[in-house]
């Protein structure tokens, strides 16, 4: 996000942009499957998405580790840490979108993309 104070923290740019790409790729695949009359992505596609998601969660938590006892995170490091934890915790919500079609992406999915872009 241009002009964001988060652009000065390159530790988070790679994984945050990769999450945006994964969300976009998943939406594109879901839209294509829906247009083809399918009710969900294939098991292979779902496993592939889960593997990418888990790998990105590992990168995100590695780039924004918990602080040592007695210290507190602030700024983009705190935002990135909270976002990494939320993405890890809510993986199944995202993956449900690959199985249970909705007419449009859920609000939380759009909000996730906005939240992720705030740390890039």
Image: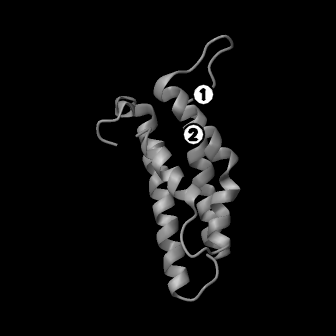
The image's colouring method is one colour
The mark found on residue 96 in the picture is: none
Question: Which percent across, then down, holds residue 104?
Answer: 54, 71
Q: Position of residue 108 (x, y in %)?
A: 58, 55
**What residue is shown at x 54% (from left), y 67% (from top)?**
105
Of residues 18 and 75, which is closer to you in this image? 75
Most distant residue in the top direction: 70
Q: Which residue is mark 2?
A: 83
Name the residue carrying label 1: 65
Q: Quick check: can you spot residue 12?
A: yes
Q: In the orientation shown, which residue stands out farthest toward the front?
A: 107
Q: Quadrant of the N terminus?
A: top left
Q: Quadrant of residue 43?
A: bottom right
What residue sits 57% from the left and 76% below the top?
A: 103
Who is closer to the viewer here, 111 or 69? 111
Up/down of 111 relative to 3, above or below? below
Q: Is residue 63 visible?
A: no
Between discs 1 and 2, the one toward the N terminus: 1
x%, y% of residue 25?
47, 65
Tell me if residue 67 comes above or below residue 18 in the rendering.
Answer: above
| Residue that appears at 43% across and 48% down | 17
User: Furthest-left residue in view?
Assistant: 3
């Amino acid at each position: 996000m241009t002009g964001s104070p988060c652009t000065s923290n390159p530790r988070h740019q790679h994984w945050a942009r990769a999450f945006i790409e994964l969300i976009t790729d998943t939406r594109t695949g879901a839209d294509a499957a829906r247009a083809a009359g399918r009710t969900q992505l294939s098991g292979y596609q779902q496993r592939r998405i889960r593997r990418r998601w888990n790998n990105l969660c590992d990168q995100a938590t590695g780039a924004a580790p918990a602080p040592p006892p007695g210290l507190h995170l602030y700024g983009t490091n705190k935002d990135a840490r909270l976002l990494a934890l939320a993405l890890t915790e809510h993986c199944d919500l995202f993956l449900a979108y690959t199985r249970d079609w909705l007419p449009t992406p859920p609000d939380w999915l759009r909000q996730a993309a906005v939240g992720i872009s705030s740390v890039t």
